[in-house]
Amino acid sequence: MILSYASQRDYDAMAGKPGAADESPWQPEDFAAMGAFMADFNRELEEAGELVETRALDAPVHTRRVGGAAGVVTDGPYAETQEVLAGYWIVECDSFDRATQIALRLGKCPAPPAVAASAYADVRPIVESSSELGF
């Protein structure tokens, strides 16, 4: 699974809302270029037979965290962390190295320079059963 991350500030910037004084929000052409890149990226993975599923996730302000024995429900975003899961790709490929190569291609996604400089993705194997966890 390839996981990408963003913060509420990132979502606000993509929507054109002003952020910190030293940041400029995404311009419509930035967002369009990112969308075109992602569409091509996904199409290429699908054509290669490596894409299983991909989804983008809505902004953290539209999130609820549920937990604990008392069933506590908290609306997001959360003070504990700035970055949240923004989207994911499940790929089926020959190796962990191949999945890493695929994720590295995300570094070519068009974005304002400050966004591109701090963007990252995680690559994590998906396990089908507890016996695969390696404990």
Image (spheres, rainbow, N blue to C red):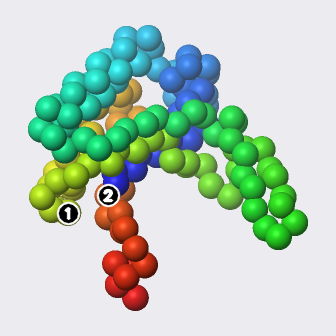
Dot 2 and dot 1 residues touching (CB under 8 Å): yes
Image quadrant assignment for residue 81: bottom right
What label does residue 123 carry, if any? Answer: 2
What label does residue 44 carry, if any? Answer: none
What percent of the width, then of the height, locates residue 125?
32, 64
**Element at badge 1?**
helix
In this rendering, the answer to whether 9 lies above or below 104 is: above
What percent of the width, then of the height, locates residue 13?
54, 25
What percent of the width, then of the height, locates residue 104?
22, 47
Q: Residue at x 41, y 19 (%)?
A: 31
Question: What quarter of the picture does the N terminus occupy?
Answer: bottom left
Q: Closer to the N terminus: mark 2 or mark 1?
A: 1
Q: Nearer the viewer, residue 6 or 2?
A: 2
Q: Nearer the viewer, residue 104 or 40?
A: 40
Q: Residue at x 37, y 82 (%)?
A: 131
Image quadrant assignment for residue 20: top right
Q: Which residue is mark 1?
A: 96
In this rendering, the answer to whether 34 lies above or below 61 is: above
- How packed is label 2: few (under 14 Cα within 10 Å), some, or many (20 or more)? many
